[in-house]
Amino acid sequence: MKATAVAPANIAFIKYWGKADEALRTPLNDSFSMNLTGAQTTTTVAFDPSFTSDKVELVGGVFSDEEALRVTRGLERIRQRAGSTLKAMVLTKNTFPKGAGSAASASGFAALTVAGFSALGTTLSEKELTVFARLGSGSACRSIPSGFAVWEKGIDSESSYAYSLYPADYWDIRDILVIVDKRMKKVSTSDGMEQVGTSPKLAARLAAIPGRMTGILEAMKKKDFARFGRILEEDCLDMHAVMQSQVPPIRYWSDATERIMDHVILLRESGVSIYFTIDAGPNVHLICEGKDEARVAQSLASITGIEEIIYNKPAGGAHTITEHLF
Ligand code: PMV
């Protein structure tokens, strides 16, 4: 009764900010993302009749009590669905810093969901797995399907799921994740989203998203990168405008964040087709096509304040592997 899963983090090009239902983690809007090869979580889950309580550990770090409780609640949902009462040991390993945007919770809950059900021998459809991952962390549902994923907001829990729109090899999009601060973000996405209704900009954002979704999916179909990039950057700035106009306001950016954004704009003016997007943190994702990656990488050498750069290609979805962490 042991299984191990690997799941990618994902970067949203049309982002999710705000829940329709807090407990079910259903979103106010549809979103669209790409899985990342360079930011992945591996999780081993083992259930055993001799365990008297759940044990949750992170390789090279520690989970806070709150994080450990979220994982235990995830195990509880898995047990309930699988009809088991056995306690579990969970060991998790990330290839990237824990505070890098919301990436760690997305890949973490996707890996936990796939490993947990597999360890109990319960086979679920991909759709159902995305629903269970979503209950742990909203964006985790998009880390289950392969490549480029759409998360439909739906009208209830079952209809709020994610699916793959294109496989990872459909388009050679790169995400150069520029880490300017490895520490955990100050305001968690869960806490931040609770106040979304206080932003006077929320209604305009929700009204704009269906058009943006259509636009970016058309750009994706035609592989029109300039249009694709314009829309994803617009949606990022729009989400941050909502965050910054909430009460109390949340500003996830730092000086270094703004320096990288300025750099992207200058690079674009010099003829490189490059755009940025930022999650709930100060780190910046530079989005370009494979042919431009080397030039972008080279240009970053002169920028101060960069702690680490993670180079990502489009990745497959969450899956089990036969090598266990323990
Ligand atoms: O998965 P959560 O509930 O931590 O929310 C993540 C939200 C953003 O990363 C800010 C945007 C997104 O759609 O990924």
Image (cartoon, rainbow, N blue to C red):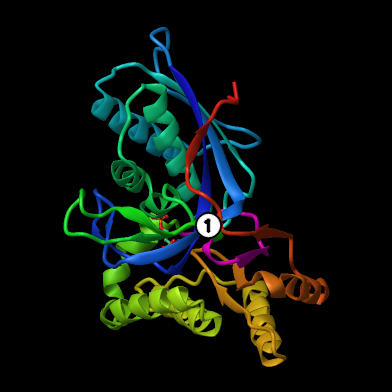
| In front of the other: 312 or 94 | 312
| Location of residue 289 (image quadrant) | bottom right
Residue occupying image coordinates x 49% and y 79%: 228
Does residue 16 appear in the picture of this structure?
no
Magenta stretch: includes residue 138: no
Q: Position of residue 157 (x, y in %)?
A: 21, 50
Does residue 141 appear to the left or right of 183 in the view shown? left
Stretch of the chain drawn in magenta? 170-187
Q: Position of residue 318 (x, y in %)?
A: 47, 43
Query: How many residues crowd around disc 1 within 10 Å: few (fewer than 14), some, or many (20 or more)?
Result: many
Q: Quadrant of the C terminus?
A: top right
* Residue designated by label 1: 168
Q: Position of residue 244 (x, y in %)?
A: 43, 76
Residue occupying image coordinates x 39% and y 36%: 113
Does residue 27 appear to the left or right of 146 in the view shown? left
Residue occupying image coordinates x 46% and y 51%: 146
Q: Within the displayed image, which quadrant is ligand 1 positioned in?
A: bottom left
Does residue 132 appear in the picture of this structure?
yes
Position of 74 relative to 205 (above/below): above
Magenta stretch: includes residue 186: yes
Q: Which type of secondary structure does the marked residue at label 1 adopt?
A: helix
Residue occupying image coordinates x 46% and y 50%: 106
Position of 195 relative to 67 (above/below): below
| In front of the other: 215 or 83 | 215
